[in-house]
Amino acid sequence: MTSGSLPNDVAGLLATFGVSAADHSGGQRVVRSPLTGETIAQVREVAPSDATTAIGRAHDAFLAWRQVPAPRRGEFVRLLGEELRANKEALGRLVTIEAGKILSEGLGEVQEMIDICDFAVGLSRQLYGLTMGSERADHRLMEQWHPVGVVGVISAFNFPVAVWSWNAALAFVCGDSVVWKPSEKTPLAALAVQALTERVIARFPEAPEGLSVLLLGGREVGEALVDDTRVPVVSATGSTAMGRIVGQRLAARFGRAILELGGNNASIVAPSADLDLALRAIAFGAMGTAGQRCTTLRRLIVHESVYDRLVSRLKRVYAAVSIGNPLDGDALVGPLIDEAAFTAMDEALSQARAAGGTVHGGERQTAGVPAGGVYVRPALVEMPAQVGPVVHETFAPILYVLKYSTLDEAIALQNGVPQGLSSSIFSTDMRETDRFTSARGSDCGIANVNMGSSGAEIGGAFGGEKETGGGRESGSDAWKAYMRRQTNAINYGHAMPLAQGVRFDIADEDNGDDRGSADA
Ligand code: NAD
């Protein structure tokens, strides 16, 4: 790639989605590619008052969409999946240019969108409620799931499009409309996805205008979404600092929050671990996406008997990993999102040194990488204890390594941080692996065995505990958060028994003349 070609490349890609030049030039928000630091677009953002109007459109759309049968709503999502399939290459490339992840991961992100669409299509013929045995004669007790309303989606830069789809594909089949506020760092991939969605809306007779609304803007626009009582559910993905504000604002108006926040994920490497397998999983987990995944492996807890063997191999892998332009097939580690991310990384490494850590790597790279981007060698940090920066999430490729002697100690270290997203154990000892996934094992939303902490499939519910926010999205029964549950008790008899045997016998002279037409 020659310097200066990126803006043209981006304009060409956006044109394939039908995004007009007016949407990505001349606006106030400068968008830079982390690959080279070049300005690739200037998008127009909305004001918080525009957000209020747009939410009104989405609310009107919801009132119509909730009446469309769920399997037809599934058909809409199937067509969206088809658009994504047809545009996977272009969208994956745009994700790479805007977010900096290697092309294979950019394409993987779009594949994840396709997968969740497929999942949602099947879901559209399910959306099951239960029936329960009633304690009263001639009564039926059951529950139904109804569309809930406008779903607000606030997303982070590092998964600029997949996070929207985990929420939107489910919300659409559940009968909801969606208002999306993407990261201000990645508006272009959002514009492309919005264009594809509008294409499907245009050719789907029952899909109302306003079914899918995109709001480009910063934090104030996100706050307008969070504060609007016409938005019963807000799914917010990003830092714990953001979630702390959003969660409290939503709670103040009794809105429902799906919070998907920061992680500080660990893997335990036990004495019986297959070290060849573990090494590959650790390398991807810790260095993949340049350490900028919520599920990135940040802490490695290694048994003392295998510590030296594993860490010496890891040091060699860290020293040799290819860093460079993520559009080139050879690079495994692309750039950090911006200069601020490097500053945060550098500060965390200084704190680690001050706390007795030994740092391998972590230097800024200038040779063999595009000028203008922020490229770093991932850092491996041997720590004497879980202190200082180890208990925080630094959104950069730093892997802290700790030693343990008993499994109890390892699990206590794994759980001994404020975050609770993802975790894993490498062991071939069943007692250890089952203990790790048991109630007294990992306290995280995700606990893997003989795998790394990152790279979740869409089939399972995704999210974590503690400061990760407690939200769940994507697969399993996460769809329930996008609907409202209604419990129905139905009396098909003539008597009027009260639950729990309560008696409330009123005096009534009539004796059955008004029993309704069924008895006539
Ligand atoms: P960020 O918190 O800076 O921004 C995320 C989004 O929140 C952006 O769209 C931003 O505009 C918006 N926002 C910020 N303050 C807001 C406010 N007060 N009200 C409403 N909206 C607000 O996060 P980031 O730097 O884009 O992403 C990195 C972070 O996201 C990391 O902490 C990472 O772990 C986390 N993340 C979590 C998950 C998950 O599923 N748990 C997934 C991806 C990223």
Image (cartoon, helix red, strand yellow):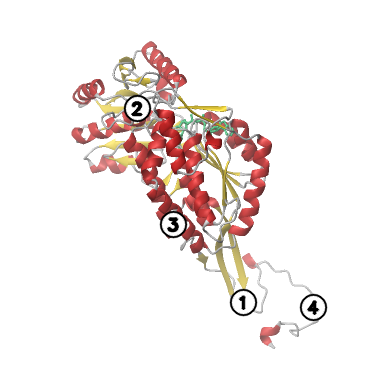
Residue found at x 58% / y 58%? 65
**Mark 1 = which residue?**
492
**Image-based side of 272 in relation to 262, left or right:** left
| Res. 334 mark | 2
Amino acid type at image mark 3: Arg
**Is 341 situated above or below 75?**
above
Mark 1 residue CB less than 8 A from any atom of ligand 1: no
Q: Is residue 407 visible?
A: no
Instruction: Report how far apart the C-alphas of labels 1 and 2 lie in the structure.
Output: 65 Å
**Image-based side of 428 in relation to 225, left or right:** left
Amino acid type at image mark 1: Tyr
Ranked by sequence position, the earlier of labels 1 and 2 is 2
> The C terminus lies in which quarter of the figure?
bottom right
> Can you give x and y, in whole percent of width and height, for residue 292 in the image?
40, 30
**Mark 4 = which residue?**
508
Q: Are marks 4 and 1 in contact (CB under 8 Å)?
A: no
Instruction: Report how far apart the C-alphas of labels 3 and 4 lie in the structure.
Output: 58 Å
Amino acid type at image mark 4: Asp
Residue found at x 40% / y 13%? 350
Ranked by sequence position, the earlier of labels 2 and 3 is 3
> Can you give x and y, in whole percent of width and height, for residue 12 in the image?
43, 37
Q: Are marks 3 and 4 in contact (CB under 8 Å)?
A: no
